[in-house]
Amino acid sequence: MLKGVKMYIFDSHVHIYPDKIAAKASENISNFYDLDMSFDGSISQLLEACDKAGVNRCLVHSVATTKEQIQKINDFITDSVNLYPDRFVGFGSLHPSMTQKEADDEIVRMIGAGLLGIKLHPDFQSFYIDEKRAMELYEVVNNRLPILFHTGDKRFGYSTPSRLANALKSFPEQRVIAAHLGGYTEWDDAVRYLSVLENVYVDTCSSLSFITPSQAKTCIEAFTEDRVFFATDYPMWSPSDEIERIKKIGLSDTAMEKIFYKNICRFLDIEVPK
């Protein structure tokens, strides 16, 4: 609620899975991060959690750990968006092991299906953000779609903020969302390397549980309130809890409106709710 008015909320980072594998996929994420999941990754639990929290819309995606999974995953995301067009928008998946022709064909297919971007997870997909085959993939993307990167994790070197900044030297026009306030467990480096790049936006998920409201505010101010998106990383965190964490940062009503929905709507070029 802002000034007594219920606010539109857009969750810009949500993982979903088909019902038959949702619980297993959620368990795998739990094991990878050694963190308990709040939900099982199914669409039904997502919608229930969103309704409870007052989340109106979600950006949904999934990650292909091999290139053979890509079309099936992108079809699932497309079907999910088509089933809930007022609740979901979708990002598709690519993999750096694809040939340039395979990547180009899939990007064309994704655009034709109405998907609005690409999700890449270097840690799950085992590639360095600035390695040669990844750079060749970005060359094929050629800013036709924005890329949402999982960014940061001190346990690995795949997705560091500095590597993303290095990659973007060759692609200064490519619009990017660096998840987790620019770098999970590497928030200082995110500010140092990424906040100065105007084509880099960040989301708030899997961050606010690990840093203080003051640290979060410092990150948001570094990227500016115009380049930050609210996100939960479902099935990891509760939308209700993440909304409350945002409210505790001490942002202005104008900043919260931007972060909760206005920024992501403009980024994706979809109508901003009145």
Image (tube, rainbow, N blue to C red):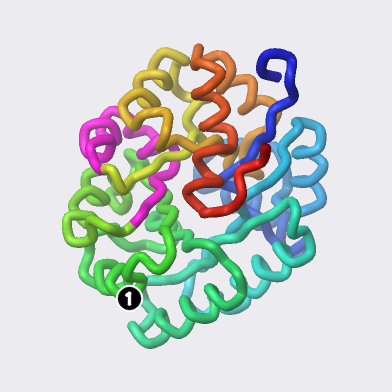
Image spot of residue 53 (x, y percent)? 75, 31
Over which residues does the magenta segment extend?
Answer: 175-197
* Of the pair 74 and 255, the residue shown nearer to us: 255
Number of labelled discs?
A: 1
Q: Secondary structure at mark 1?
A: helix
Q: Is residue 159 left or right of residue 146?
A: left
Quarter of the image containing the C terminus?
top right
Residue type, label 1: Val
Residue 121 magenta = no
- Classed neighbour count for the residue bearing mark 1: other residues with Cα under 10 Å, few (<14), some (14–19), many (≥20): some
Quick check: 53 above or below 109? above
**Residue found farthest to the bottom:** 101
Instruction: Tell me where residue 224 sits by quadrant.
Output: top left
- Residue drawn at x 63%, y 57% is 89
Quick check: 148 above or below 80? above
Quick check: 106 above or below 261? below
Image spot of residue 58 (x, y percent)? 65, 48
Image spot of residue 101 (x, y percent)? 37, 87
- Residue drawn at x 52%, y 22% is 254
- Residue drawn at x 63%, y 40% is 10
**Residue found farthest to the front:** 274
Quarter of the image containing the N terminus?
top right
- Residue drawn at x 31%, y 27% is 222
* Of the pair 46 and 168, the residue shown nearer to us: 168
* Of the pair 28 and 193, the residue shown nearer to us: 193
Image spot of residue 14 (x, y percent)? 61, 48
Q: Is residue 82 left or right of residue 160?
A: right
Q: Is residue 241 left or right of residue 199?
A: right
Which residue is labeled 1 in the image? 140
Quick check: 268 above or below 82? above
* Of the pair 113 and 4, the residue shown nearer to us: 4
